């Protein structure tokens, strides 16, 4: 048995040598916006935007876990409960599968604590009441993705799974585009869109990539 005074000394030395826990709220939001770009393949941060492969993350800080409208969360993540605080996000981003074993999010996590703090600072700014949110960097869909209503919504959703070149070459009728969207939701795991958003996307696809 280790004598109590010596045990106390070992504990003190261990605490002194352990790295200090960084302030989760001290991240660089601008760096976080850049770090978020790979995440934007699966997550939208547009106010009122729909889900892509993952839920919309606008206003995620302060929101109940597993509560983004229109997204089908795994039971394991819903069971976590509580609210997304910076501390909860830090644990989740460190290891999604460790935070909620069985979660459908296959991303391994962000090992770098500085990068995690930056991401959390960025996400914390994406709130309507903040008045100073860091703007999401605009996605460049290329010159062959025409401007117009539905451009961003359709581009974000389609580009979250595959190259937009696949979309551009389809040239489908309205009925076939509609069936394809349904098939992608039912069979490919694409998030279902609201009727209004779906109609906007369908109109964009028909106008720009419909039958000649």
Image (tube, helix red, strand yellow):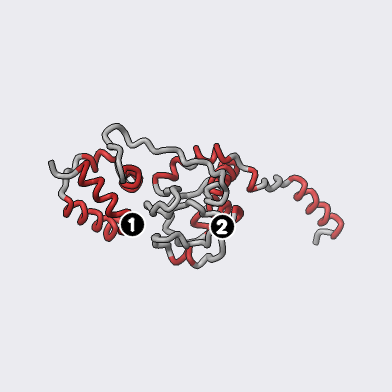
**Residue at left 56%, top 61%?**
83
Q: What element carries label 1?
A: loop
Against 51, residue 159 (above or below) is above
From the viewer's perspective, tell me whether residue 130 is left or right of residue 206.
right
Gap in angstroms between the C-alphas marked 2 and 1: 24 Å
Name the residue: 67% across, 47% down. Answer: 23
Which labelled disc corresponds to residue 193?
A: 1
Residue at 22 percent of width and 40 percent of height:
168
Label 2 CA crowd tier, 10 Å (few <14, some 14–19, many 20+)? few
Name the residue nearer the viewer: 126 or 200. Answer: 200
Image side of residue 4 versus residue 14, left or right: right
**Residue 139 image-quadrant placement:** top left
Q: In this view, does 164 lie to the left or right of 122?
A: left
Residue shown at the point (45%, 40%) measured from the top left? 37
Residue 51 location (% of width, % of height): 39, 54
Q: Vertically, is 210 above or below 102?
A: above
Asked whether the viewer can see residue 116, the reply is: no
Give the SS element for disc 2: loop
Q: Quadrant of the N terminus?
A: bottom right
**Disc 2: which residue:** 62
């Amino acid at each position: 048995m280790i004598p109590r005074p010596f045990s106390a000394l070992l504990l003190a030395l261990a605490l002194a040598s352990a790295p200090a826990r960084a302030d989760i709220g001290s991240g660089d939001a601008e760096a976080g916006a850049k770090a978020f770009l790979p995440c934007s393949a699966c997550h939208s941060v547009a106010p009122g935007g729909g889900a892509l492969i993952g839920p919309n993350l606008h206003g995620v800080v302060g929101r109940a876990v597993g509560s983004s409208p229109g997204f089908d969360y795994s039971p394991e993540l819903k069971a976590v409960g509580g609210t997304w605080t910076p501390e909860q996000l830090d644990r989740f981003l460190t290891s999604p599968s460790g935070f909620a074993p069985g979660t459908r999010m296959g991303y391994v996590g962000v090992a770098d604590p500085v990068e995690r703090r930056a991401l959390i600072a960025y996400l914390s700014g994406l709130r309507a009441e903040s008045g100073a949110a860091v703007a999401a960097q605009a996605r460049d869909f290329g010159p062959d993705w025409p401007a117009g209503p539905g451009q961003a919504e359709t581009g974000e959703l389609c580009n979250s799974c595959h190259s937009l070149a696949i979309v551009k070459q389809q040239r489908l009728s309205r009925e076939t585009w509609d069936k394809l969207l349904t098939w992608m939701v039912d069979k490919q795991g694409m998030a279902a869109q609201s009727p209004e958003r779906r109609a906007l996307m369908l109109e964009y696809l028909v106008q720009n990539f419909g039958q000649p």
